[in-house]
Amino acid sequence: MIIRKIKKDDLTKCSKILKRAYSFKPYNENFKKHTAEFYILNKYNNCKDSSFVLLDDEQNIIAFAFLNISYWSDGRQAVLEEIVVDPDFQNKGVGTTLLNYIFEQLKSLDVKSVMLWAKKDDRLLKFYKKHGYSIADDFVVMFKNF
């Protein structure tokens, strides 16, 4: 497996992986026409300098991650905006490989903390807890639909 910075040419494949991965439980999303493509393009435009794809042995993209790096009171902070693994490659260590690579990159940039939002799903929470994340007792994510 190879991990490299994301390129604009990767976005179509990433949007297909996103649509496929998010169509399954716990998300069960059904993207409207071009919504996934617009979402991925927006993430790329905002995060391209610190985002990655993971390729299999045949050079196919099988996972990707978007990170947004900014500053907070103690220094540099990252937000893991997205990490998505093609469903055919889940539970095979691909997400762990990509996440470990991301952590090393962030450490080399002297990033002090990483935040993410995750669905309240036991499988997802177990994965992130295994990698050192903890649930913040003093924060809540809120939504308002129109």
Image: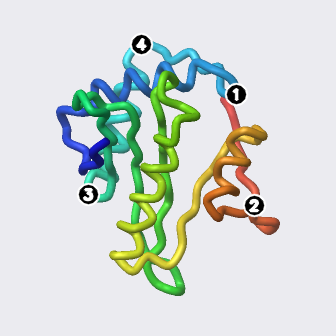
Judged from the image, the secondary structure of the residue bearing numbered disc 1 is loop
Residue 141, x across and y down, in percent: 71, 52
Which amino acid lies under the numbered mark 3 shown in the image of this protein? Asp
Q: Which residue is mark 2?
A: 135
Q: What residue occupies the far bottom of the structure in this picture? A: 74
Which amino acid lies under the numbered mark 1 shown in the image of this protein? Pro
Q: Which residue is mark 1?
A: 26
Q: Which residue is mark 3?
A: 49
Q: Mark 1 or 3 closer to N-term?
A: 1
Q: Which residue is mark 4?
A: 33
Q: Mark 2 or 4 closer to N-term?
A: 4
Question: Mark 3 or mark 4, which is nearer to you?
Answer: 3
Which amino acid lies under the numbered mark 2 shown in the image of this protein? Ile
Does the residue at mark 3 contact the one at mark 2 (Cβ under 8 Å)?
Answer: no
What distance separates the C-alpha of mark 1 from that of mark 2? 18 Å
The residue at the point 28 percent across, 25 percent down is: 12
The answer to which image quadrant residue 91 occupies is top right
Residue 67, x across and y down, in percent: 41, 55
Q: Mark 1 or 4 closer to N-term?
A: 1
What distance separates the C-alpha of mark 1 from that of mark 4? 21 Å
The residue at the point 40 percent across, 36 percent down is: 63
Q: Mark 3 or 2 closer to N-term?
A: 3
Q: Pick the quarter of the image with the C terminus.
A: top right
